Image (cartoon, rainbow, N blue to C red):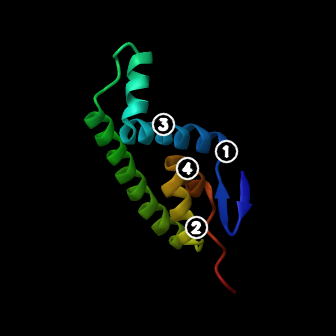
Amino acid sequence: MAKGSGVTRPSLFWFALLDGGIVILANLVLSEKSYEKAAELGSGNLPSRSTLRALLIGTAVIHAGEALAAGRMARRRGLSPRGWRLQTLVVGFPSLRVLRRTALAPAPA
């Protein structure tokens, strides 16, 4: 885990796995050509674009909710809410897991 500006980053594996999947999902939703190629490769076993669109929207809503929760949790721990919100918006639950393991900041003397 890397540290920077009070935010502890989860493993890069999580960024690659989760954000890579979101990028692929967005590409399938936004590009007819990509969707057609993937459907061809998958022998027609690909969900409809409207189903994929709903999945993408749901993913965005979940990440936004997680980001709001991370901001509140970070503030209670005396950490940077903005940094934790942004990171959690991008990577989701792995960021929340790291934040939960982060100790409360010591009270000012």
Number of dots carrying numbers: 4
- Looking at the image, tell me whether mark 1 or mark 4 is earlier in sequence order: 1
Determine whether label 2 and label 1 are within 8 Å by CB: no
Q: Position of residue 72 (x, y in %)?
A: 46, 68
User: Image point 66% across, 75% down: which residue?
Assistant: 106
* Numbered badge on residue 83: 2
Q: Tell me the SS state at disc 4.
A: helix
Side (left or right) of 43 relative to 3: left
Determine whether label 2 and label 4 are within 8 Å by CB: no
User: Image point 34% across, 17% down: which residue?
Assistant: 45
The residue furthest top is: 43
* Numbered badge on residue 24: 3
Quickly name the residue at label 4.
Answer: 97
The residue furthest bottom is: 109
Q: Position of residue 42 (x, y in %)?
A: 41, 16
The residue furthest front is: 33
Q: Quadrant of residue 67?
A: bottom left
Q: Tell me the SS state at disc 3.
A: helix
Q: Quadrant of residue 77?
A: bottom right
Q: Tell me the SS state at disc 2.
A: helix
Quadrant of the drawing holding the C terminus: bottom right
Amino acid type, mark 3: Ile
Q: Position of residue 81 (x, y in %)?
A: 53, 71
Q: CA distance from mark 1 to mark 4?
A: 14 Å
Amino acid type, mark 4: Arg
